[in-house]
Image (spheres, rainbow, N blue to C red):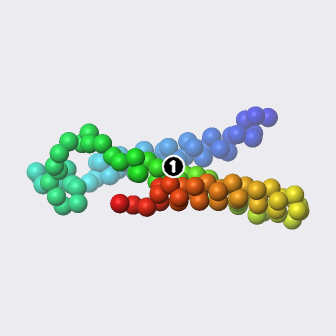
């Protein structure tokens, strides 16, 4: 019973692994090999690398990433809610209104703290 449920998924993963393996190895075997110094050099916006790769980033980068993830997850919750909105009725609308109000308060808080301003 378990094999009949998960069998097609396992077959799909196996086929995907075979396709990836064939593609990578075909590119490796059939592709031209003429490495030059300029092709092997690190490329960074056309400029030579300067400084250490271990430099510290501003906290603003991480704060922006966290805010993006939070509001991206919000959209993930909105799609299923929109699909079953008629079944949920007013309870569903009020629950989502509460959820959106909490997110809006968080956004206003971040805005007032200056987290959305880039200097």
Q: Position of residue 2 (x, y in %)?
A: 76, 34
Q: Residue at x 41, y 51 (%)?
A: 60
The answer to whether residue 93 is left or right of residue 17 is right
Q: Which residue is mark 1?
A: 66
Q: Nearer the viewer, residue 112 or 102?
A: 112
Q: Position of residue 82 (x, y in %)?
A: 76, 64
Q: Residues within 10 Å of mark 1 (few under 14, many from 20)?
A: few
Q: Quadrant of residue 108?
A: bottom right
Q: Residue at x 54, y 46 (%)?
A: 15
**Residue 65 against residue 45 in the figure, above or below:** above
**Residue 3 against residue 72 in the figure, above or below:** above
**Residue 28 against residue 2 in the figure, above or below:** below
Q: Residue at x 40, y 51 (%)?
A: 61
The answer to whether residue 52 is left or right of residue 9 is left
Q: Nearer the viewer, residue 40 or 99?
A: 99
Q: Position of residue 31 (x, y in %)?
A: 26, 54
Q: Is residue 108 visible?
A: yes
Q: Quadrant of residue 87?
A: bottom right
Q: Is residue 34 visible?
A: no
Farthest residue to the front: give it.
Answer: 112
Q: Position of residue 78 (x, y in %)?
A: 70, 60
**Dot 1 lies on which element?**
helix
Q: Nearer the viewer, residue 38 or 42?
A: 42
Count the marks: 1
Q: Residue at x 14, y 54 (%)?
A: 48
The answer to whether residue 72 is left or right of residue 31 is right
């Amino acid at each position: 019973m378990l094999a009949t449920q998960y069998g097609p998924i396992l077959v799909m993963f196996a086929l995907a692994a075979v396709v990836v393996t064939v593609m990578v190895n075909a590119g490796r075997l059939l592709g031209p090999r003429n490495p030059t110094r300029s092709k092997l050099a690190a490329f960074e916006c056309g400029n030579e690398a300067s400084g250490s790769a271990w430099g510290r980033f501003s906290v603003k980068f991480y704060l922006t990433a966290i805010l993006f993830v939070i509001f991206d997850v919000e959209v993930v919750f909105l799609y299923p809610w929109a699909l079953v909105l008629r079944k949920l009725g007013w309870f569903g609308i009020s629950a989502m209104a509460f959820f959106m109000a909490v997110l809006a308060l968080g956004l206003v808080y971040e805005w007032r703290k200056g987290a959305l301003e880039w200097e």
